[in-house]
Amino acid sequence: MNEKNESEIIKSREENLKFILEKGIMPYKYSFQRTGTINEILEKNKDIKEGAESEDVEMLAGRLISLRLHGKTIFGHIKDSGNKIQIYVRKDDIGEEQYEIFKKLDIGDIIGVEGKIFKTRTGEITVKVSKFELLTKSLLPLPEKWHGLKDKEIRYRKRYLDLIVNDNVKKNFELRTKIIKEIRNFLDMQGFLEVETPMMQLIPGGAKAKPFLTHHNALDLDLYLRIAPELYLKRLLVGGFEKVYEINRNFRNEGISIKHNPEFTMLELYVAYADYKVVMQIAEDLVVNIADKVLGTRIIEYQGEKIDLTPPWKKLKMTDAIKEYSGIDTEKESEQELINRLKQREVEIRQGITKGELIALTFEEFVEEKLIQPVFITDFPVEVSPLAKESRKNPGFAERFEPYIFGREIGNGFSELNDPKEQEKRFKEQIEQDTGGEVARVIDKDFIEALKVGMPPAGGLGIGVDRLIMFFTDAPSIRDVILFPLLRPQGSE
RNA sequence: GGGCCAUUAGCUCAGUUCGGUAGAGCAGCUGACUCUUAAUCAGUUGGUCCAAGGUUCGAAUCCUUGAUGGCCCA
């Protein structure tokens, strides 16, 4: 398509490659023995005096990210996964022929250099190159050095460019891994067992969401990618595991937004003999532990808003939260009054909607976005909590909570319903009420059977890991914490 | 699904108000320069202005449709 235009900018690289091949140099080497990473070498030589040279000859490798040619000397920087270091090449040091070859290198090439370390007049620790080796030829230009790569579409589609050019992007993804490791560490220390349950499920359960459909050929079987692992983890409680968790992908066949990617990472954990209060505490401890261990602070700034994670977090019953933030008294108001309020905001109301559903909608519509500081919303209406036990103290409401930060739900937990007959009834009601294909048409009979065998009382918790990571990395979009977010393919045939 | 906005050189962006020769910086190329670092200096190449239609003597600019992305809403 743009081959003619592209060739203009690529031509010189192809010509440089040709030059190198003619010199008998292999442009794609097999390995390079380094004496250290750039960070290690910088650290080792940090006290070197200006004008002095290190005793050791070091061997370093990295991508060439800048070049400054000055006739018979060249300055540049190479960058590895941890840092960058300046290199200094003198014609006198490496000889005429090597110098001519070096001049044919392009920004983006990956090279290995050998030399002593010294400090320049301006105080920068620098490699005085005595030998160099082209390790990988780069045939396409990198984004511009000063402004970098800003186009979000290219950043997401070609994440490798984003990672090469934007250092903070790489840091955020390193932070993501640290956070997930710390979650595992935290749970493992408390005696949890990490497990893996099916991604492909016959009946997609455990949440309200549209599933992806796939097919197993040998069994000629339609299967769904899981929308949640919940019903399988509960089977493990029946089987006798008492503390289990899973961190893995869920798939939901729904819209894409700043908060939604079709595949996303979920933490779910279950504790036998515990109720929702126990897992609420775990949720709080878990988030605070990440703040302490990974960031070293409990006060984080998200999108310009200071968020104080210091425990204990506020707890508010859903109906009280509605009262506090909107002045609506859901106890006193009739269903029709609530419907009128919601309709004014153009919220769709299904036929035969229950009071509980109206309360949940009112909460979503009038309260959610105002919950900036961490808060647990508790006591959700039973009708919207089909997998939770009804409250001992507050009939019509479930022993359920959701932690909110910056107006966003980051988790969900409850005292798990373990009465098989009640569970079956709730599933049936859900199917009747479902209008959008967000609930499986079929009841998971095997799960009900497991409950009949007997699941111990248990508390369960789910946390949207990507959303949590968004807070800790100050990422405005979920796409900034997922390496390869789903995008529509370009230029379809 | 709806609304708004964007799409111009490899990258970052002007130019669109009010239609009149397609612009800059960086990158690339040529030359000078043996401590520079957004190197500097001189010169220079590079364009399907997202696509297709339309209006017009004339369209990057106005209109229509579509594509992709972003933000907001559902």
Image: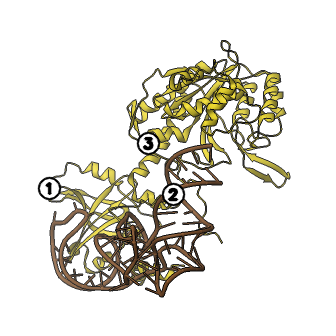
Chain colours: A yellow, B brown
Q: Chain of mark 3?
A: A
**Mark 1 vs mark 3: which is more N-terminal?**
1
Q: Amino acid at mark 3?
A: Thr
Q: Are marks 1 and 3 in contact (CB under 8 Å)?
A: no
Residue A40, position as x, y percentages in the image: 32, 50
Q: Would you name the residue on which mark 2 appears?
A: A156
> In which image quadrant can residue A91 be found?
bottom left
Q: Chain of mark 2?
A: A
In the rendered image, the quadrant that contains the N terminus of chain A is bottom right
Q: Chain of mark 1?
A: A
Q: Nearer the viewer, mark 1 or mark 3?
A: 3
In the rendered image, the quadrant that contains the C terminus of chain A is bottom right
Q: Would you name the residue on which mark 1 appears?
A: A50
* Front-most of residues B14 and A80: B14
Q: Amino acid at mark 2?
A: Tyr
Q: Is residue A237 above or below residue A206?
A: above
From the viewer's perspective, is A275 left or right of B13? right
Q: Which mark is residue A473?
A: 3
Q: Which mark is residue A227?
A: none
